[in-house]
Image: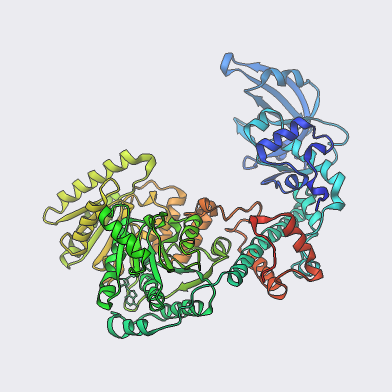
């Protein structure tokens, strides 16, 4: 259905084909609708004019009416600048240009009256503004102030003189043409319930705000709208999948009971039991499961994954467990092999370094169905890996895998898609989880196994290293083991590697009687594993490593984690690393080492670590500090693509938007009711995310 919003921007008054083409190419703005939803990212307050005498040093920017009294050029060549004395009845100041002097010189008239705008800087005892915006004073612009919306633009656009002012003018022209033809996309009931502006009014004020209050209401309405449609799509996807995709039924419990009574080495926590029940409900439902299992590091997700696998195997399905790294895959394999062997269940491991001969055997046994559990890395995704009947995929540490990988596993059984259980220890703030994984059902393990003591975390400057070393000696004397972790990032790999080696040297000197292990990314997988095993068996007491040990490694006797250059790690990473200790019954410690010089954000990260052990609190701070775009994995996933809402700041709005979307779909899943026609029309016209709004059936 063609609406006025689908009109091409070249037909907009004052736009012109050239400019339209630029906007097509540079910003992907083709239609009226694209232009309308190209929101400003900030505003400059031009609502009031200041007197020169009112200027204060801490002002971001000021707008002033005044007269140019004198113009002079100072200096020579590169250093030349143009200086104009500018005054109003309250005082005078200087305007300075270093660039485009010729052009300004031509334009500027002594005794001419102008409106200027820019950031004032105190120089000596006089204010000046460098490269101010400049406009001749006219009877119209001298009266009315306004908010200047600022749009993000490209270099190329600026070069062609398409700036925020030009877009502002285009918006004016656009609203002049279509203000009353912009279709609403929220039902009246929602607008009333949440006190939201009409869509056209909100769009108008987001581009041409009359005052702060109007802007605030406009923002709120558009954020709500965006999050509402985001949630509507995710919830709908979930509903469609549940009704469309059959899942294998795993309702037997004999194997599980045998495991519980004969082999389970500890009592499961209440949270673990609850999650297993949630999965079991899914397994009995006949619908395909897509579940995200979140649980802080050390909360015991692996055993839950294994128990779910047992349920599948009991019903003659095959299962796989995929880990993000080889070290982790090996560790999972060894952990599960014990149980599998004693229960007579076949299990194998497949990674990039699996030998050809083993590979052939594994492929065969997967295809003929003899092999029940396969543990591995992304090697499992290859097309050569075929199953007879894959029933469940457990994916560990999801943030390392994208949505595409999930889909690949899912297609390994075309006859009936396998159930998917995604496990992650990367605590995701609720709001982010909702927007990222809103299409998954979520289970949470929010309880640690009994008997764990909270890890004590401290911050020490490098100057106290000797003291720290003494502490480590004391712990080793008690029979504990220690991790010492160094940062290693690609951009500074050479330097970091040297840093790690220097560190290793100095630790060998400081601990001459201790056997040390070292693990870093440049080592072969087999060597890494060898060192890990030595450490795990207690043959070495200290493990010097880069972040390769970040996820999942489990050595319960290791009780001290020293993190060197802690200021260089992100919060999520620090928390992951700390999670390597605190797994046994002993008191564990995390020591964050840093230099004296700490930036504001680094300090906040370290302080947060010292203050709390709670992964979700940490994730919240991380989200505030870094914004959602930076959180691990979310960038690549492309799922969080919001134009105006900000998940770090708008969690409240998100909550309401989700509730609203939920209740509408519950009441009217096909959007057939009259009052929901506006929604249906909007979804159809903006086929967001390629979701077809066909019958659920
Ligand atoms: P994560 O959730 O970080 O993957 P793991 O599954 O590696 O955690 O479990 C951490 C450690 O806790 C392992 O040594 C595991 O055997 C142990 N564990 C798991 N559940 C329990 C429990 N209910 N009681 C005691 N120990 C447990
Ligand atoms: Mg784990």
Residue at image coords 72%, 59%: 683
Picture layout, residue 200 above or below residue 555 = above
Picture layout, residue 432 above or below residue 306 = above
Q: Position of residue 286 (x, y in %)?
A: 53, 77
Q: Looking at this view, is 50 or 403 the one in front? A: 403
Q: Position of residue 564 (x, y in %)?
A: 31, 51
Question: In which quadrant of the rendered view does residue 670 lie?
Answer: bottom right
Picture layout, residue 585 above or below residue 512 = below
Ligand 1 is found in the corner quadrant, namely: bottom left
Residue at image coords 28%, 52%: 353
Q: Position of residue 55 (x, y in %)?
A: 69, 39
Picture layout, residue 133 above or below residue 311 = above
Question: In which quadrant of the rendered view does residue 347 lie?
Answer: bottom left
Position of 258 with respect to 65 (left or right) is left
Q: Position of residue 35 (x, y in %)?
A: 74, 44
How many marks the image carries: the answer is 0
Position of 199 with respect to 528 (left or right) is right
Looking at the image, the residue that sits furthest to the left is: 513
Q: Is residue 230 visible?
A: yes
Q: Is residue 554 visible?
A: no
Looking at the image, the residue that sits furthest to the top is: 76
Residue at image coords 31%, 38%: 494
């Amino acid at each position: 259905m063609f609406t006025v919003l689908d009109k091409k921007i070249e037909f907009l008054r004052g736009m012109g084909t050239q400019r339209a083409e630029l906007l097509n190419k540079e910003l992907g703005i083709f239609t009226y609708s694209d232009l309308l939803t190209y929101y400003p990212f900030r505003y400059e307050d031009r609502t009031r004019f200041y007197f020169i005498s009112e200027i204060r040093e801490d002002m971001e920017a000021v707008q002033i009416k005044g007269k140019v009294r004198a113009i002079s050029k100072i200096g020579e060549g590169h250093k030349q600048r143009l200086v104009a004395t500018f005054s109003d009845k309250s005082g005078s100041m200087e305007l300075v240009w270093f660039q485009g002097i010729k052009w300004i010189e031509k334009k500027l008239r002594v005794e001419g009256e102008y409106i200027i705008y820019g950031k004032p800087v105190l120089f000596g005892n006089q204010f000046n503004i460098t490269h101010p915006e400049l406009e001749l004073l006219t009877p119209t612009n001298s009266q009315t102030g306004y908010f200047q919306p600022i749009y993000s633009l490209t270099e190329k656009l600026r070069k062609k003189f398409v700036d925020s002012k030009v877009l502002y003018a285009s918006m004016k022209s656009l609203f002049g043409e279509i203000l009353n033809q912009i279709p609403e996309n929220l039902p009246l009931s929602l607008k009333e319930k949440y006190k939201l502006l009409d869509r056209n009014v909100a769009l108008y004020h987001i581009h041409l705000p009359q005052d702060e209050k109007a802007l605030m209401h406009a923002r709120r309405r558009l954020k709500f709208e965006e999050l509402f449609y985001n949630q509507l799509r995710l919830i709908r996807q979930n509903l469609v999948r549940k009704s469309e995709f059959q899942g294998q039924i795993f309702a037997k419990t004999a194997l599980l009971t045998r495991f519980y009574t004969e082999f389970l080495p500890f009592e499961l926590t209440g949270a673990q039991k609850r999650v297993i029940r949630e999965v079991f409900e899914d397994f009995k439902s006949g619908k395909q499961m897509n579940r995200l299992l979140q649980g802080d590091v050390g909360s015991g997700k692996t055993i839950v994954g294994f128990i779910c696998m047992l349920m599948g195997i009991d019903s003659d399905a095959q299962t796989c467990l995929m880990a993000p790294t080889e070290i982790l895959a090996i560790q999972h394999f060894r952990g599960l092999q014990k149980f599998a062997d004693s229960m007579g269940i076949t299990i194998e491991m497949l990674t990039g370094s699996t030998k050809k001969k083993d590979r052939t055997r594994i492929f065969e046994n997967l295809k003929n169905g003899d092999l029940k559990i396969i543990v591995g890395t992304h090697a499992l995704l290859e097309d050569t890996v075929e199953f007879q009947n894959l029933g469940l995929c457990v994916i560990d540490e999801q943030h390392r895998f994208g949505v595409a990988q999930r889909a690949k596993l899912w297609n390994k059984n075309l006859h009936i898609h396998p159930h998917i259980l995604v496990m992650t220890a990367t605590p995701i703030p609720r709001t982010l989880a909702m927007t990222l994984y809103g299409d998954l059902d979520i289970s949470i393990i929010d309880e640690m196994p009994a008997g764990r003591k909270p890890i004590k975390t401290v911050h020490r400057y490098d100057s106290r290293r000797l003291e720290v070393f003494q502490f480590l000696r004391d712990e080793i004397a008690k029979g504990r083991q220690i991790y010492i972790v160094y940062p290693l990032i690609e951009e500074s790999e050479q330097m970091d590697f040297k840093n790690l080696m220097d560190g290793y040297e100095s630790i060998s000197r400081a601990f001459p009687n201790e056997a040390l292990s070292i693990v870093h990314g440049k080592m072969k997988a087999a060597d890494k594993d060898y060192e890990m095993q030595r450490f795990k068996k207690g043959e070495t007491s200290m493990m010097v490593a880069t972040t390769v040990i970040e996820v999942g490694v489990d050595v319960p006797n290791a009780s001290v984690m020293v993190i060197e250059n802690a200021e260089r790690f992100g919060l999520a990473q620090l928390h992951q690393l700390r999670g390597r200790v605190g797994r046994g019954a002993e008191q564990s410690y995390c020591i964050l080492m840093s230099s004296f010089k700490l930036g504001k954000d680094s300090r906040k990260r370290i302080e947060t670590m010292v203050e709390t052990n709670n992964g979700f609190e940490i994730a919240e701070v991380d989200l505030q500090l870094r914004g959602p775009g930076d959180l691990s994995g979310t960038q690549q996933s492309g799922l969080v693509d919001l134009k105006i809402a900000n998940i770090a700041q708008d969690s409240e709005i998100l909550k309401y938007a989700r509730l609203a979307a939920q209740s509408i779909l519950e009441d009217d899943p096909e959007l057939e009711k009259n009052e929901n026609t506006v929604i249906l029309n909007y979804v159809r016209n903006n086929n967001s995310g390629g979701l077809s709004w066909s019958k659920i059936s």
